[in-house]
Image (tube, coloured by chain):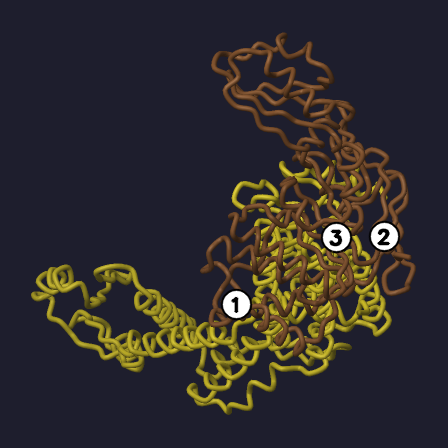
Chain colours: A yellow, B brown
Amino acid sequence: MNYLKQVITVTRWEFSRFFKPKNEALGIIIMVLTSLVFYFGGKYAFSDTDKKAVIHIGAEMDASLGEFLGSHYVVKEIPKAEMDSFIEQISHEKEGILLETEAENFVVYAYKNTRAIKKLKARLTEYHQQREMQKIGLSHDELAALLSPATVVESFVYADNSGKRVVLSYFFAGLMIMALFLSFAYQFTAITGEKQLKITEQIVSAISPQVWMDGKIFGISFTGISSMLTYAILSIVGGMLFFQFTGMPASGILDYLYLPSIAVYLPFALVGIFIWNAILAAIASIITDPNNSGKSSLMMLPMVFVIASFLVIRDPDNGFSVFLSWFPLTSATSMPMRWAITEVSYLQLAGSFITLLLTFYFLRKLAAKIFRVSILITGKEPSFREVYKLSKLK
Amino acid sequence: MQKTVLSVNAISKGFQHLKAVNNISFTVGQGDIYAFLGPNGAGKTTTLRMLLDIIKPDSGHIAWSLNGKQNQLPAAGQIGYLPEERGLYLDIPILKSLVYLASIRGMEKAAAKKTALEWLERLGLADRAKEKLQVLSKGNQQKIQFVASILHKPTFAILDEPFAGLDPINQEIFIDYIKEINKQGTTILLSAHQMPLVEKIANKIFLINKGHELYNGDLTGIYQTFGDKTIIELQLESPFNETTFLNLNGVENIEIVDDIHAKITFGQKTRLKDVLHDLTKIEGICDVTSHKPDLHEIFLQLVKKQ
């Protein structure tokens, strides 16, 4: 039985062990339900905010303020004699806003500081600015010209760094984090579980440690990738529904899905996930007791590198971002992110990808060697030093 | 002439300060049931792991010759292995596990499924094929483990402590299974420390203690070489006094079992008639039985000589 056939057998086994369509479907249903609850719950909870809010003002207040506020609020006047009782009513009923003026100042009474108060303050600032400009004798047109933004004619060499691309690159990083979390969980369960169930010796008597390790890397990577793709498709469908509900065309989602970036992301993400699975498998191989091992925390290592990739978004063209897009532990996410939001030469893209592939090739070999060494050490958990020493033996 | 399928030449293996296997050599012929015998920690499992290349010997050479092919290590499909450390996927259906373990040894899935179901039928577990292994009793789990090691019909099966953890009835059943697969053409190399069981199936044995060879050859040969002695088991009325018996003719060894029981081994040239005559002169003997040494007793003799 050749290497490839054995690897395919182990890969399929590992994939079927962890990829459970039923669980996947259940996860999706929970996610859809949660989204619906958030969407419709939010709509219901904030349904009042769509209506004009009611604001009470003193009856003797400047008419122009009442008029100005009238375009944004339902304005109700309160005679001065009733003000105190209204303020008391606010504290009992925990709602209502009362506005009055003292000389040049505005005074607001409300139960607590809310978004509505912040909005009101913004309106009052606007009113105040208009009043001040009128005082210095500016005409309406002059005022409009004064407040209008500067006209800038833009001419960029690279003009595709829209906010939509940034959203896409965040989406890439998010999917990668998800795949890594799943890989972490499955790789840990698979390897430490087999060690604890004492299956390892039976398996390595039939296949080489390299076949075993490769099968695990591929099988569990594909499990993570399957979930990643499922949720990516679900997010796209969710995005389309969101657009539809919010009055935009569902096809608007296509503006976010820039195909060349996706085409670059997929192979980079695939090899990146393989790399991290090789590293996770190697760490899991030297863990004897997952509940008490100090090495378990090392399994969170990949997250540090994926999160570091977010730095690329701040300035994709500076030296550190370029480094991140070449360094094999970050390039799987950083390079597609840079590719989405700035101009990257094909040569850089190819060079980074080849580096990534070579790193995977050597890491899987190292992982198999560590596994082979770690099964020789029984009883106590091997230290990194012991693993290193043994790995130098034949 | 019997064909040699495994030839082991002067292999040694040490772990830190312990020499687990020390310069041992043996050959296994096609069709043999070859038993590796020794107490716990004798070096049996280390030797078997070296044969499978799970660990490498420090020195020496291992040569396989299965199905006419000279290899350092045969293909996975030619070898069956029952490890000393038993383990299977507890949370996966029995049939699925068996088919997977056979398929990584190169057996086609359909054939593996068919053979697995035949074995499960024989074990009376066919109706539980889709259940998870964890629901089976320990004895049944052991049987499944055994089936997993020979399901793919290997040319050569290595069974490390196949009788460990089995009750006497299941030990007999396993003896029958081993004999059966041997008849079907599988050469067997097993390790054990239950010598009476090994006597029932092995044709060749290797006695090992503390990594050293004590005996290597035919089972019949060991009786011819070391078994032509007489062992007298005595029961006395009062506590056993060793000096009383040391002066008897031909005494080689005295083993005190307890206060009033002892086993005395007489040399090859000693006649039973003379021994019994001498014993009649000693007072306080309530019971006397005699027999030729079994494998266990020969092993103990050899360990003492070592």
Q: Is residue A350 left or right of residue A172?
A: right
Q: Which residue type does callout 2 highlight?
A: Leu
| Residue shown at 68% from the left, 25% from the top | B272
* Mark 2 / mark 3, whichever is N-terminal: 2
Judged by depth in the image, the label closer to the viewer, 2 or 1, is 2
Tags 2 and 1 touching, CB below 8 Å: no
Which residue has dot 2 on it?
A: B6
Looking at the picture, does residue A238 appear above or below residue B136? below
Q: In this view, does B252 lie above or below A157?
A: above
Indicate the amino acid at tag 3: Ile
Residue B4 occupies which quadrant of the picture?
Answer: bottom right
Residue where numbered disc 1 is placed: B93
Q: How far apart are marks 2 and 3 (CA)?
A: 12 Å
Q: Mark 3 points at which residue?
A: B33
Position of A250 with respect to A299 (left or right) is left
**Residue B248: which quarter of the image?**
top right
Alpha carbon of mark 2 to alpha carbon of mark 1: how far? 35 Å
For label 1, the SS is loop
Give the chain of mark 3: B
Q: Say few, some or many: other residues with alpha carbon within 10 Å of mark 2 (under 14 / 14 to 19 / 20 or more).
A: many
Does the image show residue B87? Answer: yes
Q: Do labels 1 and 3 share a chain?
A: yes
> Can you give x and y, in whole percent of width and height, for residue A306 in the image?
64, 59
Q: Where is residue A39 in the image (x, y as percent from the top left)?
A: 38, 77
**Quick one: B79 or B215, which is closer to the camera?**
B215
Q: Which disc is residue A222 wearing?
A: none
Q: Is residue A337 visible?
A: no
Let me know if marks 2 and 1 both belong to one chain: yes
- Report the front residue among A34 and B216: B216
